[in-house]
Image: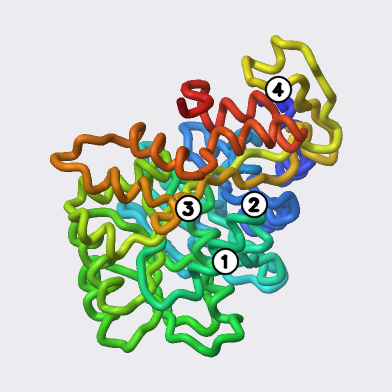
Amino acid sequence: MTVAEHEKHPIAEQLRRLSSSDPHYAVSFVDVLLRAAVQVRASDVHLQPTREGLDLQWRLDGMLHQLGSFASGTSSDIVTRLKVLADLLTYRTDAPQEGRIRNPSWSSEMRVSTYPTLFGERAVVRIFSAANQLMFPRELGLPDETLNEWNTLLSQSSGVLVISGPAGSGKTTTAYASLREMLRAPQGVRSILTIEDPIEVPLPGAAQAQVSPAFDLSTALRSALRQDPEVLLVGEIRDPDVARGVFNAALTGHLVLSTLHAGSASQAVCRLTDMGIEPYLMHSGLRAVLNQRLARRLCRCARETSDSRELLGLPVSSARIAVGCPDCQQTGYAGRVLITEFLILDSHSVSRTAIHLPDREWDAASLERHAVQAGMIPLRQRGIALVANGTTSPVEFHRVLGDVGLVVD
């Protein structure tokens, strides 16, 4: 959908009919906007202040779409209304703030983040899944063999499980789904603690802690070990101190889940070594790396093509490409599909050999070659299969995975 088409969205038209001089303008605007965002399953709503008012965007299936420009309000202000709902300080406009909106009638919990800019406060609303939409690993769309191996690892008593990928690849969703699987496991109750920044969704059965300037990740991790946990979720491995803390926890008999920003499973291993994790710690502690991406799933309105120009150089004989219809908001896509590669260090033993080469005589590419030779199915091979079976398009493949190195030699 083009910008012009987005600005003709029924919700945009409804918002434009509201009078900015009405004392209840901000209340009505926010209510209409957030209800619509929940209805279309937007993950984020952006309100960007400009000289004239507010630019409004929302994120659907990972892509940001423009809804248009609107008045911020004459006698009532839209961003101020969001701050009231999120219990933020309305008089404080010179510093970032974060809060939550809990409205049962919307069936979703939301996080509001404000940020001072040149023309006023920018606000972003993150919309979390409704309680009845929260997932377990089986509902994530993992390949069957990956799902079975991942669930087996979740039943282990110690070790580090890393979920890697770039921002917006669904790492936190996978982590939460994994914890829910543990909490319902028939083996018995386990003591589960989380250290997050921020806490995204309340998780009954787990003790969740949010870091702060006075309670950083390293401090929280050391303190958590005194709480008799069996399973720890560390929101993200960001620096060497946290990395060492995660591996020390694993080596003292805890199962630790964490996320890491990395482009591939092999790059995740390299990042950990760059953070100072020695080969013997990697060998003893790291159980597996699940690397993932989220690609948009084609709507049923997609059309079939065998035109080589539309296949964009992918090794497939035909594919489906996006068209657009009212059901998918004219985007051509509806929902998202997970693309994964799964490096298990016990099974892909060649990877262990590579890790132990002296003086870092290996890099991410060579480590990936070792892993593929040992049985790992790389990310791009999974992606090509999704294009071949019509789940996603060649354009989306290239947007998510790039066009370099489609297969590992």
Helix or strand or loop: what does disc 3 sit on? strand
- Which dot, 3 or 1, sits closer to the camera? 3
Residue 316 image label = 4
Asked if residue 64 shows in the view, the reply is yes
- Dots 4 and 2: beta carbons under 8 Å? no
* Residues at marks 2 and 3 touching, judged by CB atoms closer than 8 Å: no
- Which disc, if any, is residue 268? none
What amino acid is found at the position of numbered circle 3 in the picture? Leu
Identify which amino acid the numbered label 1 is placed on: Ala
Which residue in the protein does label 3 denote? 290
Residue at numbered disc 2: 143
Helix, strand or loop status at disc 4: loop
What is the spatial separation of the Cα atoms under label 3 and label 1, in whole angstroms?
13 Å
Categorize mark 2 by other alpha carbons within 10 Å: few (<14), some (14-19), many (20+). Answer: some
> CA–CA distance between discs 2 and 3?
12 Å
Circle 1: is it few (<14), some (14-19), or many (20+) Cα within 10 Å?
some
Residue at point 36%, 32% (across, down): 365
Does residue 216 appear to the left or right of 301 in the view shown?
Answer: left
Question: How many other residues sit within 10 Å of disc 4, few (<14), some (14-19) or many (≥20)?
Answer: some
Comparing 47 with 317, the one in front is: 317
Cβ atoms at labels 2 and 1 below 8 Å apart: no
Amino acid beneath label 4: Val
Q: Is residue 25 visible to us here?
A: no
Q: Identify the image quadrant of the N terminus.
A: top right
The residue labelled by disc 1 is 177
Mark 2 vs mark 1, CA separation in Å:
15 Å
Q: Camera-side residue: 96 or 310?
A: 310
- Disc nearest the viewer among 2 and 1: 2
Among numbered discs 4 and 2, the one appearing first in the sequence: 2
